[in-house]
Image: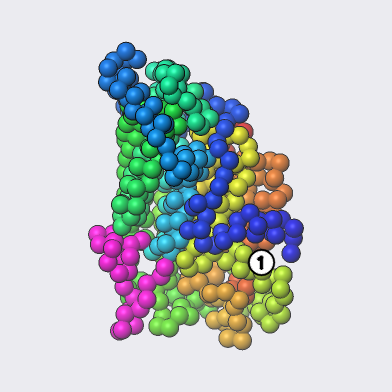
Amino acid sequence: MKKYTWILILLLAGCSKSVVETNKEFPLLQASNKDLQGGNWKTVLTFNKNDFQPASPLSATDPAYQKQLDEVAALQQNMSAEDKENLNYWGSGAVLRWNEIIRQLVAKYNLPPVNNPDGTYPIPSAGNPLAYPFFPFANPPYAARAYAYLSVAQYDALVAAQHWKTQYNVNPAYQRDTRIKALLPDNAVKSYPSSDAVVCGASAALLKLLFPGEISFIDQQVALHKKARLQSGIETAADLDAGEKLGQQVAQLSIARARTDRAGAAIGISNGVDLWKEFEQGAISRNEVPWISLESPKRPPMLPFFGRVQPFLFDSATMVTQVRPGPPPSTSSEAFKKELEEVKYYSKNPTRERIAIVHFWADGVGTYTPPGHWNAIAAEAFVTLGWSELRWARAMVLLNMSLMDAAIACWDAKYFYYNPRPSQVDPEIKSLTGIPNFPAYVSGHSTFSGAAAEILAYLVPTKQQQFRDMADEASLSRLYGAIHYKSDCTVGLTVGKKVAGFAIQRAMSDGAGQ
């Protein structure tokens, strides 16, 4: 096995179970470049920053403000060991920690429903999220979209916050009261509105939409985050209130887009064979073997209409004309038979090295999915770079828009071609991991990995070869696991790279530099 995989196994121990990762220790966020001009960076969603103007901050001599300084001083004097642990946890970065939280929720909800006694499968309901099956079923496309919308809300809100910091020019609490100490690095420079509270407010608003059964848990995290910021000595309650409100307001733009991006129709499907008959008949009309569910009883395919969701980085017409790949080898061709034999070879000749690779990249049921795996890899790379909170948010939004649009492009190809899995064509092929309940071409892992590695290579050029090697290995893991043909993997990587190319084009003109 390549050396970098073993390094990642050590760094991301338990990465397939994101619940473990949420208490991971990271260094405190200390920005070497505070990106003071970030209020001028291009936002993802178009809006006028003046429409989200916070109320004018309190005067330093206002009794109400003095009372808030008293509150901070008192909180610092009575910190428990648990408070200090909480302070350091959130001090690693708001974007980092809220991204961890969504990965935890994705892992918790990445559970396909069990069938009913009559052989049908129940459908999660957003209107009744705590009834079985719990809403949402956070499968890879759903997860990729969730990560993207969270990141968009965080980034856009932070750009707006930086704009207003420059306008109001409010010094942090520790500079205004000698009783108060700065217990965390002062990365925002100016405190009104609070950057952490902006991320907190935006994140909570999105997560409550995406995981409506977790409102109590999300509110608990908000309270812990805000307490840490008060005890940091940097912000007062007024700074936090203004930031949280700004984050919530800007997040509504992301929520409005999410409600109209066509994902509701893609996610909220019902049972019935008629739903996928059109795909099956399309394959038969091309003289191809159509995909069938290998589960018992047969389960409806996962999100057959997710390819119709509105992407962030390009329009649907561009996806069809520029991103959608050409067809796979015909199921009646010699090329297909050759690829099938290759899969069979890996099925019958597993090695310890290949098995380790298969399981490291599996990211199946109960995990934060392949997009979440790449979010974790990104976090490990970013913590060493001394980025500001805003630059963190920009990097995560570029990554996660790429992953969402990669999911859309991948699912478009899967259901356009409706290609069978290897073990469907040859029952002697036994996979080394679970067989996903959707068509083979193209590989989702490969598409996600191609997109993620390419955008990460752009953002962290000193590690570009490492990221691309990881993507190649993630892609090959699906061939080694005997659930994908070689062309599924190689073409999936290519599709992912094409998607990332659109994100890189955006990054080159957003005003943030490299």
Judge by depth and name the residue closer to the eye, 87 or 298: 87
**Rendered location of residue 56, percent (x, y):** 31, 19
Residue at x-position 57% and y-position 31%:
31
Asked whether the viewer can see residue 93, the reply is: no
Which residue type carries mark 1?
Answer: Ile
Q: Relative to 58, is 24 above or below?
A: below
Judge by depth and name the residue closer to the eye, 47 or 350: 350
Quadrant for the C terminus in the image = top right
Residue at x-position 45% and y-position 61%:
107
Mark 1 element type: helix
310 left or right, relative to 455:
left
**Rendered location of residue 454, percent (x, y):** 63, 48
Residue bounds of the magenta highlight: 111-136
Label 1: few (<14), some or many (≥20) within 10 Å? many
Q: How does the figure colour the protein chain or chains?
A: rainbow
Judge by depth and name the residue closer to the eye, 505 or 334: 505
Q: Relative to 295, is 143 above or below?
A: above
Q: Relative to 325, is 402 above or below?
A: above
24 left or right, relative to 107:
right
Residue 117 falls inside the magenta stretch: yes
Residue at x-position 59% and y-position 78%:
431
Residue hosting label 1: 357
399 left or right, relative to 57:
right
Tell me the chief SS of the magenta region.
loop
**Rendered location of residue 235, percent (x, y):** 40, 27
User: Most extreme residue toward the bottom, as rendered?
Assistant: 428
Asked whether the viewer can see residue 114, the reply is: yes
Q: Which picture quadrant has residue 477?
A: bottom right
Q: Which picture quadrant has residue 237?
A: top left
Residue 384 falls inside the magenta stretch: no
Residue at x-position 62% and y-position 45%:
381
**Rendered location of residue 416, percent (x, y):** 48, 65
